[in-house]
Image (cartoon, rainbow, N blue to C red):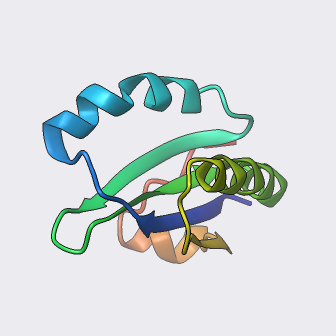
Amino acid sequence: MPTILQVHFPFDGPFGEAMVDAMTPLAQSINNEPGLLWKIWTEDTESKRAGGVYLFTTRADAEAYCKMHTARLKNMGVTAIEAQILEANEALSAINDGPLSGFR
């Protein structure tokens, strides 16, 4: 079942185009994570927060990535990491054009 991972944390920047410049290698490496289907990068310059919403093929893949990513963030000195793992309801998401179909 497709599984969503949401991760958000305090972040002092960079944001916007500077974030693209700084994070492109990381974004490219995330594509190699087992079970990853897609990631939406999130940022809020006003509240100084960043993170992402990920879709994985299985809960096990989401849990493994969450464990690794949380440890990586902590090693970088990031605290107050918020992470949630949720199963996606494919039938209801399809009604609202959620990008879940065809990912098996």
Q: Is residue 35 left or right of residue 8?
A: right
Quadrant housing residue 14? top left
Quadrant housing the C terminus: top right
Instruction: Name the residue located 74 percent from the left edge and 47 percent from the top edge.
Output: 68
- Nearer the observer, 22 or 31: 22
What is the residue that sits farthest to the front in this orientation?
A: 77
Instruction: Name the residue located 65 percent from the left edge and 46 percent from the top edge.
Output: 72
Q: Residue 65: horizontal and vertical position, in percent? A: 72, 48
What is the residue that sits farthest to the right in this orientation?
A: 60
- Nearer the observer, 16 or 86: 16
- Nearer the observer, 103 or 15: 15
Instruction: Name the residue located 18 percent from the left edge and 63 percent from the top edge.
Output: 45
Instruction: Name the residue located 37 percent from the left edge and 50 percent from the top edge.
Output: 41
Q: Residue 53: horizontal and vertical position, in percent? A: 47, 59
Vertical position of residue 4 compared to residue 33: above or below: below
Q: Residue 25: horizontal and vertical position, in percent? A: 44, 22
Q: Residue 39: horizontal and vertical position, in percent? A: 47, 46
Quadrant housing the N terminus: bottom right
Q: Is residue 15 left or right of residue 27?
A: left
Q: How many marks?
A: 0
Quadrant housing residue 102? top right
